[in-house]
Amino acid sequence: MPLVINFLAGVGAVAAAYALFCLFRAVHTYFLRPTSLARYLSDDAAHPSWALVTGSTDGIGLGFAKELCARGFNVLLHGRNHEKLLRIKSELMTAFPTRSVAIAVADASDFDQTSLYALVEQASNLPEGGRLRILVNNVGGAHHLIGKGIFHPLRDTNLDEVDKLINVNVRFPTRLTAALLPVLTRDVNTSLLIINMGSIAGITNMPYVVVYSATKAFNLAFSEALGKEMKAQGLAVKSLGFVIGSVDTPGAPKDSQGAILVTEPQHMAKACLDRSGCGQWVLAGIWSHWVLSILLKVTPEFVLIGKIKGLYLKQRKSK
């Protein structure tokens, strides 16, 4: 009996120590540690720093574009709507007159090599001798991409719709990153940052967003594996994957998500940029979503399933 008690006491001590470590790391990450984003700003006037933000005409992508301009970066805006891109470009140049802004049109839902390589070519030959220092793989979304709201059962999703969800969330950012790596790493000593947007759905595997959950799990695994590969190759490329909770965006309004710990798009973008240099591969963008990810892990399965089902039924009823 004393051996059992000692063993359990030891296990409890280890568990308590691990919990304290996680808490300390979270406090340091979200409240104490300053961002290191400035390392990606060039001090060479002949080669100014640029950032490419995919899906940048609204939501978190637009938030990234604004924050990056505010922090001294020129921005290459990506989207599929030329008119919206021109409008956002004009707004950014008015708000940040010392920044340069360019646009690139490519439909992430199409398996189109021509537009993707055109985007890569544009990112390779930026104005004024600019160099791409940051890539934000932000484009993505759930069933609003196919006109079905956020929540939708897989059995009522046709094959073209499944392809669209996979193309936007997985295929486009993966192919773009692979095609841009030779551009990003042409100077092996230059510090570069790749941000990949995941989701809490990717770690909780939620019902009624089956394909979306799977794609976001891929995004997080892709981001971590890429970061480790860059480190193994001795390249100064950091890859950060973010577990994103509820954000009030046009495609996913806060009420449709249950209004649980919802944040604003630009606040989320700012928080993600602030996490630069944190030393982690994958993490929540803001502290409240870190708390939410822990709570979801200990929430009974029937409660989570019931909550998501309720949101789906509410969405269906409102149509």
Image (spheres, rainbow, N blue to C red):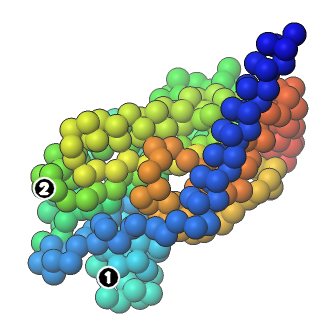
Specify whether 223 is left or right of 18: left
Q: Residues within 10 Å of mark 1 (few under 14, many from 20)?
A: some
Determine whether 319 is above or below 163 in the image. below
Q: Are marks 2 and 1 in contact (CB under 8 Å)?
A: no
Determine whether 135 is above or below 171 in the image. below
Q: Position of residue 287 (x, y in %)?
A: 67, 57
Residue type, label 1: Arg
Q: Position of residue 46 (x, y in %)?
A: 11, 78
Image quadrant in which you'd find residue 210: top right
Residue type, label 2: Asp
Q: Name the quadrant of the N terminus.
A: top right
Q: Is residue 98 visible?
A: yes
Determine whether 150 is above or below 76 in the image. above
Badge 1 element: loop
**Which labelled disc corresponds to residue 99?**
1
**Which labelled disc corresponds to residue 312?**
none
- Residue ID at (36%, 65%): 77
Q: Is residue 57 visible?
A: no
Badge 2 element: loop
Q: Nearer the viewer, residue 155 or 139?
A: 139
Specify whether 277 is left or right of 265: left
Q: Position of residue 254 (x, y in %)?
A: 75, 57
Q: Position of residue 255 (x, y in %)?
A: 80, 56
Q: Nearer the viewer, mark 2 or mark 1?
A: 2
Residue of label 2:
187
> Which is more N-terminal, label 1 or label 2?
1
- Residue ID at (38%, 34%): 225
Number of marks in the rendered image: 2
Specify whether 98 is left or right of 316: left
Which residue is situated farthest in the top direction here? Answer: 1
Which residue is situated farthest in the front direction here? Answer: 2
